[in-house]
Image (tube, grey):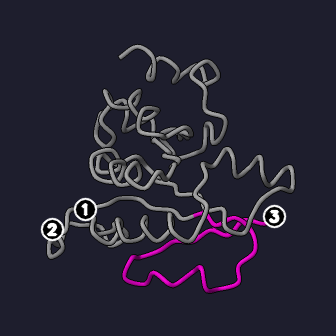
Amino acid sequence: MKVKSYFLFLSDFLPLHKIKLSGIKIITYHGVYKDELSNERWIPPHFVKLSEFEKQMRYISRYFKPVNLRDAVKALKSGSFSSKMTVVTFDDGYANNFYLALPILKKFSIPATIFLVTKYIINQDLFPFDKIRLLNYWGVKDIGMTDYLNNPIIQLDYQLSQIWPKYKHLLTEK
């Protein structure tokens, strides 16, 4: 398949537009943190500093064609994809995805796919439960969910009416 996945630390961000890459790029993030927390030991090493995340999104919007995961899959299936297509995803649905990353994504008109872990939605440990339905407003058209063991439940074609029945009420009742 013509998909390239990139796991980036912003300090290592390469001039990808100058490298000959075929296929769709998928850039995966977990979390974003405020710059003033840079020296805190509790910040996971795979999180990205907010100012660096903004630089990356500016870069992606300038040199690539950001698309959501659903459109990327459709383009792959039809053979109409471009090597400029780039997908931004977030794993696990940390609250900072909503409070810090989404405003920047909106600023640069970059769609994103967020994979939420249902265990944390139920416990409200990560993603703010009351904000799930606001994701569409922010331009997040694709939401993936995983169960307690981090097994994929859905990955594409997010629609409230088609979510696994066990978890449908999580997105519609509250």
Residue 30 versus residue 128 in the image, above or below: below
Q: Position of residue 85 (x, y in %)?
A: 66, 62
Which is more N-terminal, label 2 or label 3? 3
Question: Mark on residue 1?
Answer: 3
Question: How far apart are labels 3 and 2 at the CA level?
Answer: 39 Å
Magenta residues span 1-26
Q: Is residue 45 magenta?
A: no
Residue 97 versus residue 130 in the image, above or below: below
**The N terminus, quarter of image:** bottom right
Residue toward you, 81 or 13: 81
Residue 83 versus residue 127 in the image, above or below: below
Q: Secondary structure at mark 3?
A: loop
Q: Looking at the image, which residue is at 52% across and 84% down?
A: 15
Question: How far apart are labels 2 and 1 at the CA level?
Answer: 7 Å
Q: Position of residue 160 (x, y in %)?
A: 56, 22
Question: Mark on residue 118?
Answer: none
Residue 160 versus residue 89 in the image, above or below: above
Q: Position of residue 127 (x, y in %)?
A: 33, 40
Which is more N-terminal, label 1 or label 3? 3
Amino acid tagged 1 = Tyr
Q: Secondary structure at mark 2?
A: helix
Residue toward you, 116 or 8: 8
Q: Is residue 160 left or right of residue 51?
A: right
Amino acid tagged 3 = Met
What residue would you read off at disc 2? 37
Amino acid tagged 2 = Leu
Question: Mark on residue 33?
Answer: 1
Residue toward you, 81 or 168: 81
